Each structure stands twice: as structure tokens, then as C-alpha cells.
Amino acid sequence: MQLWSDEIEAMRPEARAVVDAGMAFVAELFAGDGEPPKDLEGAVQHMRRSFERMYSPVPEAIVRDIAGVPCRTFVPEGPATGIYLHFHGGGMVIGAPEMSDSSNLDLCQRFGMAVISVGYRKAPEHPFPAGPDDGIAVAKWVIENGISEYGSDRVIVGGESAGGYMAAAVALRMRDELAAVDNLLGANLVFGVHDWGRSPSQRGLRVFDGPDMLTPEGMAMFGDCYLPGMSIEERRAPHISPLFADLHDLCPAFMSVGTADHLLDDTLMLAPRWAAAGNEVELFVAPEMPHGFQAFPCGITSAWAAAQFDWFARRLVS
């Protein structure tokens, strides 16, 4: 099994240098924040303040409530080719839609899609199922109002990290609760969390021991915030962890992950299960790339972006 091409293999030295330099910059960026507090609430607030430096809001975003949920939206000129229902990352604890303004604006302009980035509720203040409940509420509104508001009710769900988890969870609930799988054009699952029981790579058993934005300790903290008091087995219930769900009759998916990512196994296990259930899957594995690899510009990330854009284009003409 060849998980990446010879062309991608030749790009590894450049990628390694870019990641090393980028990680050094990230460490310097956050060096002034000091040690996080020991208590959970204090640690969460510390992380949120630090993470806000990664927000890059753009003036083209339209802020509105949809189904009672705050969202940032991007609207094309004329009828939309489809609606991208986007979910930001942050372990279900930190992050905000503003993190992805630039990429969401680009998708809107590049493909004529309307983009709705959902400001779902976060833990520990709002543990499971608050976030997915917000996601499915917005999805229901889109199906009912998409044509009148944007000229389309065809939906692609997608997101990064916890947003990839949210996209998978919402796709499953669109199938099961809304009987709306026919509205689903695809799922763009970028290094998602699909096993809240902590896959081997989440626990630190990675195939490539390179620098990463995540740590096993951080993943454990996110899980404790989002699913407080639950055992590992309880966290692997099908309605919580998409990896353990019935995956039949779902939409085509584009899944991507780096081999240094502590979420590597979540994607490597979900992709073949998604395909074995009879769904189309395209898998992009980025050797030596960490969590959040799109922030490290190099040949591999350019190849990933091109593959992702090609997937979007093919889904929107289907």
C-alpha cells in the first residue's frame, strides 16, 4: 500500500525544514504566555487567550445568527453552486470561526459557494452534545432555507481537527435525523478527531516522531472537558465517536492527515471503514507533516491544496 506518491516523497526534505522553522516560530510566539494554570478552568482560559493570536478575521465575513447559533458567512455573487457548512478546530474547547476566514473566503470566491462557518458551543461550559446539536440545527436550517437564501440546498460539510469531527458527526445526523443524505455532496475531513476513546496516535504511539502542534496530554484534557465523567468505552459510543458509527449510505469524503499528527490514526482508521461501507473516499497522507499542516507552506501542502480544490470542483458539478 502506497499512501503517497513518489513525487510527494521527494518533497519530504523541504517539508521537514519548513516544519522545523515553523515550530520554532510558534514556540517563540507563545513563549511570553508563561506556564498555564494547573486547574482545568484556568488552563482552558489560558489556551483560549493564546489561541486568539491565530484569528485572522476579514471584512467580507457577514456575521449572523442561524438557528440561534452565531455564524460567519460568505456569500457569492449570484446563486451559490453549493453551501459549505464549515466547522472550526480547537478540541471542542478553544477556537472560533474567525480562524478560517481567509480560507473560507477563498472557497467562496473560487467556487461560487456560500460558506457558513458555525460558532458552535464549546466545552467545558457546554460539553457533549452541545456542539453537534448546534451543528445539526444549522444544517437543518440550511436544508429548509438554503434555496431561498443562497439559491442552493446542496451541502458539503467540512472542517479541521475538532471541526473534522463535527463535520463527520453532522453528516451522520443529517442521514439519521433529517433523512437528508441526498442533500450531502461531500465531507471534507481534515485531520479530524474520530475516536474520542483516544486512538494509538492520540496516546503518543505515532509512526513518525516529529514535532506536532498536539500532545497526548492536550488531547486527554480536551476529552475530559468535552466528555466529562465518561469512560473510554462510553466515549466510543457510535453517536459520540464517528469511527464506531454505522457508515453506510454516506456521501463521498476527502480525508487528509500528516504522519506526525497525533490524530493520524483517527483518519487512517476512518477512511477504509468509510470506503468498506460503500462510500467514495479520497485520502491524502502528508509524510512528516504535523497537525495543522496547512499552516506550513511547502510543496506537500501545495499538493494537498490542489487535491482538495480538485475534489471540491468535482463534487460541485456532480
Image (cartoon, grey):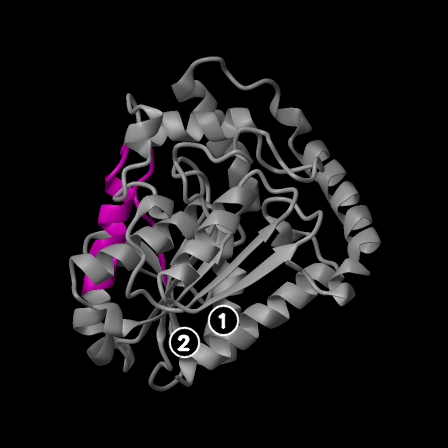
Residue 171 position, x and y percent, is 30, 59
Residue 311 position, x and y percent, is 51, 74
Asked if 262 appears above or below 133 in the picture, the reply is above
Left/right of residue 190 with respect to residue 197 in the rendered view? right
Tell me the amino acid under the disc marked 2: Met
Residue 7 position, x and y percent, is 77, 67
Q: Which mark is residue 107?
A: 1
Do the CB atoms of the residues marked 1 and 2 lie less than 8 Å apart? Answer: yes
Asked if 265 appears above or below 85 in the picture, the reply is above
Most foreground residue, 99 or 260: 260
Residue 300 position, x and y percent, is 71, 60
Query: Does residue 124 appear anywhere in the picture?
Result: no
Asked which secondary structure carries label 2, the reply is: loop
Most foreground residue, 286 or 57: 286
What residue is shown with label 2?
A: 113
The residue at the point 31 percent across, 65 percent down is 250
**Circle 2: is it few (<14), some (14-19), or many (20+) Cα within 10 Å?**
many
Find the magenta span and give its range: 116-140
Left/right of residue 102 with respect to residue 112 in the rendered view? right
The residue at the point 25 percent across, 44 percent down is 239
Image quadrant holding the C terminus, namely bottom left
